Amino acid sequence: MADIMGGDSNRKGSRRKKYVPGLACIKFSPDDYWSPDEAQRLYEGSRHPSLDQDTIRFEDCIQGMERMLPNTVDLVVADPPFGIDFSGKEAVYNRNQDLVVDSYQEVDADYGEFTERWMALLHKVMKPQATAYVFSGWNHLEDVLRGARLGGFTTINHIIWKYQFGVFTKKKFVTSHYHVLLLAKDPNKYYFNKMEHYPLDVWDIKRKYKAGEAKNGTTLPLEVVKRCIVFSSKPGDLVFDPFMGMGTTAVAAKGIWRHFFGFEKNENLKHLIDERITKITPGEEYASLEERIREIRDEARKKYPLAYKVFLKESGGRIDAES
């Protein structure tokens, strides 16, 4: 009977390895990754002749995108105006007003119509494999979702960026998140480079401030923008930002071997943007595969100590990128 039913020997042979939470995370390695030398060659060898790459034009993005040729950009990072009465100097934000540049310009038209116009043009200038990360507060999220739908985009992810600086409230919950829509021009062709084993659609990334540093009222953290770029572009690609603000997208792109292009309406920011971009050299923030794997495993070791011990035993103590 034991032989007919698949006796003990068969059951032993078919037994799977015990599941160890976190082990797959520790063993993970991205499919697409380029050595620093390869990334530099791609960056230096890429040209985007239809526009002046690595420049920011100080003009309205709608007028600028109307003149751009179709299918020219590889990735978009867009943080449009809030559509609210905001300057970044309000007392509730607990900032030194003298360090907040008079730069924030609100939409002077119907927000829904404005959103439909710029998102339709955005779809035009994106390559078929391109994606767009569009940031939005909750107050105009409906307009942004509608603009994306009417513009021909497919929503791939609705990401929540959780931050740490919600304004104190008395009669409602404290708002402490931002919406980030990952949109594809073509849902069958878009590029996505999975950089983590289990990348969540909730990002817990703190906004860092430097005391005494001039800024505008709405600057995104560099780490948030870099996360968008490394997951959805390759070295040498062109990253486009229609609302450059302080030039964070340009700084992030340049630091990890990507080109940039974008628009910004307010020329009061020009000297600050130029200063930020000049300070960084191409590729200085680019991490090698070994550094990336080490970072992944250091984080996993803290979160999954048992899995890390199993990994060390299986790899014979080797913790390099190939093990």
Image (tube, grey):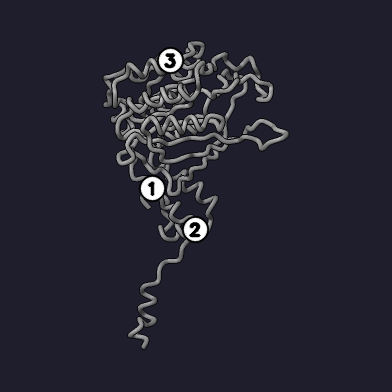
Asked if the residue under mark 1 is in contact with the one under mark 3, i.e. CB atoms within 8 Å, the reply is no
Amino acid type of disc 3?
Asp
Circle 3 crowding by C-alpha within 10 Å: few under 14, some 14–19, many from 20? some
In this view, the residue in front, 19 or 86, is: 86
Mark with earlier residue (2, 3): 2
Would you identify the image quadrant in which residue 293 lies? top left
- In whole angstroms, how far apart are the C-alphas of marks 2 and 1? 17 Å
Does 239 sit left or right of 244 as displayed? left
Say which residue appears at 37% left-offset and 86% top-offset.
Answer: 2
Provide the secondary structure element on which disc 2 rests: loop
Position of 131 compared to 20: left or right? left
Residue 148, position as x, y percentages in the image: 42, 32
| Residue under the point 65% across and 25% down | 93
User: Residue shown at 50%/17% (left/top)?
Assistant: 109
Q: Quadrant of the N terminus?
A: bottom left
Q: Amino acid at mark 1?
A: Ser
The secondary structure type at the circle numbered 1 is loop
Q: CA distance from mark 3 to mark 1?
A: 41 Å
Marks 2,3: beta carbons within 8 A: no
CA–CA distance in space, label 2 to label 3: 50 Å
The residue pinned by badge 1 equals 29
- Amino acid type of disc 2? Pro
Point out which mark residue 21 bears.
2
Question: Does label 3 or label 1 sit earlier along the sequence?
Answer: 1
Say which residue label 3 marks. 60
Q: From the viewer's perspective, is residue 282 above or below residue 306?
A: above
